[in-house]
Amino acid sequence: MKKILSLTLLLSALLLPIYSYAQLGSFFGPAKSPAEQRQDILTKNQAVLKQLYKAQPNAKDLIEKSAGYATFSNFGLKILIAGGGTGSGVVINKINPKPIYMNMAEVQAGLGVGIKSFQNIFIFQTEAALNNFVNSGWTFGGQVTAAAKYDKDGAAYQGATVVAPGVLMYQLTDSGLAAEITGKGTKYYKDSTLN
């Protein structure tokens, strides 16, 4: 059992950085410049928003009325009992429209094998919620279901889920909008190279 655990951890440690480097251009070719990386993230941001608006058209209204939003494109890998994910994204603040580039890292436990890609979209209802997300190295530590998706007046948030005070979230998979949002052990933090 110790050998299996060691092998699993070793494979996870080797394969996840390969994906991270691939995002930057890969070690099989020239790495992308910071300007190219920023442009790639902004292009992905537009693609994620387009996918979200197709799956949930009312999300556009929520974003337009918000203090800001963030999109993240994530990749996860799980081998036996260990797994994790990595991704990048951007926060757009309506007051200061200069993009804030961020990374995410995820650690998973539990039995399983597989690779998944998904997109997370955060909508910040207040400037304070946005600043807390950006500046505090926010950690999403649980699994949230669609039970808490109503505003103070009882109106639905059009499929978004409340994940923190003033923060709504959508999660998209290859098959569309996720009914249950997962994010155990996920940390979001500023990208010191791109900002």
Image: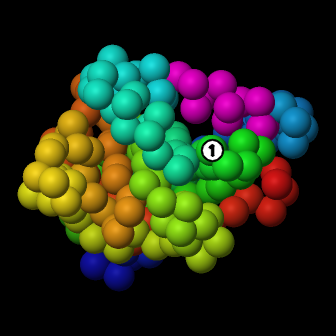
| Magenta-drawn stretch contains 108 | no
Percent coordinates x, y for residue 138 in the rendering = 51, 71
| Residue 8, visible in the rendered structure | no
SS assignment at label 1: loop
Question: In the image, what residue occupies the spot 48% across and 60% down?
Answer: 126
Q: Is residue 125 above or below residue 27?
A: below
Quadrant in the rendering for residue 192: bottom right
According to the picture, the residue beneath numbered tag 1 turns out to be 94
In this orientation, which residue lies closer to the viewer: 181 or 83?
A: 181
Q: Residue at x 77, y 45 (%)?
A: 98
Would residue 42 be counted in the magenta stretch? yes
Q: Height in image: 158 above or below 126?
A: above
Give the overall secondary structure of the magenta segment.
helix
Q: How is the image coloured?
A: rainbow
Above-or-below relation of 17 to 176: below
Residue 169: x and y, percent?
A: 35, 50
The residue closer to the viewer here, 169 or 19, is: 169
Magenta residues span: 37-47
Mark 1: give few (<14), some (14-19) or many (20+) Cα within 10 Å.
some
Left/right placement of residue 187 relative to residue 159 reads right
In which quadrant of the rendered image does the C terminus lie? bottom right
* Residue 49 seen in this snapshot: yes
Q: Is residue 111 left or right of residue 170?
A: left
x 19%, y 59%: residue: 152
> In this orientation, which residue lies closer to the viewer: 164 or 175?
164
* Amino acid type of the residue tagged 1 in the rendering: Lys
**20 over 24 or under it: above or below:** below
The quarter of the picture where the N terminus appears is bottom left
